[in-house]
């Protein structure tokens, strides 16, 4: 049986889950679509594209993705996580059965 998580531990896992969802979509975008989204975000923010560095441009794309990706509210996610953690654990960096970085733990002997 799993031990009960604190509210802070649940919130950390929720943030992991949200980040994983956004990352999954971000990584599936073509270079062309990423650039198009960045141009749209820059235009919407009324910023000149040449005035931004790479990190700032990617921040804009990430914020845009956050607006476009439906993510559950924390309370809804926490209720479902408590009932069915196995539905989420594979996406979390700090979950039972995974090493740091989300890699499955296993027998490392060859």
Image: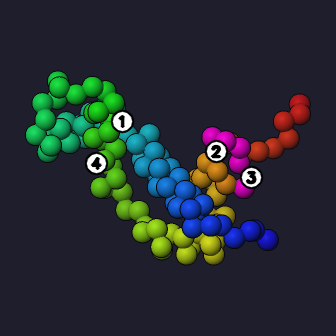
Marks 3/1: CA distance? 32 Å
Say how the picture is coloured: rainbow
What residue is rendered at 17% in x and 24% in y? Answer: 50
**Mark 2 vs 1, N-terminal side:** 1
Residue 17 in view, yes or no: no
- Judged left or right of residue 20, residue 4 is right
Secondary structure at badge 4 equals: helix
Q: From the viewer's perspective, is the residue at label 3 or at label 1 nearer?
A: 3
**Mark 3 vs 2, N-terminal side:** 3
Q: Which residues are magenta?
A: 96-101
Secondary structure at badge 3 equals: loop
Secondary structure at badge 2 equals: loop
Circle 2 packing at 10 Å, graded few (<14), some (14-19), many (20+), is some
Residue that numbered label 1 is attached to: 30
The label on residue 64 is 4
**Mark 3 vs 1, N-terminal side:** 1
Marks 4/1: CA distance? 15 Å
Marks 2/1: CA distance? 24 Å
Secondary structure at badge 1 equals: loop
Residue that numbered label 3 is attached to: 97
Q: From the viewer's perspective, is the residue at label 4 or at label 1 nearer?
A: 4
Residue 106 in view, yes or no: yes
What residue is rendered at 31% in x and 27% in y? Answer: 54
Circle 3 packing at 10 Å, graded few (<14), some (14-19), many (20+), is few
Marks 4/3: CA distance? 32 Å
Residue that numbered label 2 is attached to: 102
What residue is rendered at 54% in x and 70% in y? Answer: 78
- Judged left or right of residue 95, residue 46 is left
Is residue 99 covered in magenta?
yes
């Amino acid at each position: 049986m799993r031990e009960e998580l604190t509210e802070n531990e649940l919130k950390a896992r929720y943030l992991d889950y949200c980040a994983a969802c956004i990352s999954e979509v971000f990584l599936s975008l073509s270079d062309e679509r990423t650039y198009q989204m960045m141009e749209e975000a820059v235009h919407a923010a009324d910023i000149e594209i040449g005035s931004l560095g790479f990190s700032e441009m990617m921040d804009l794309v990430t914020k845009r993705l956050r607006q476009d990706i439906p993510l559950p509210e924390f309370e809804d996610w926490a209720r479902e996580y408590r009932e069915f953690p196995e539905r989420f654990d594979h996406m979390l960096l700090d979950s039972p059965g995974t090493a740091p970085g989300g890699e499955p733990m296993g027998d490392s002997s060859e």
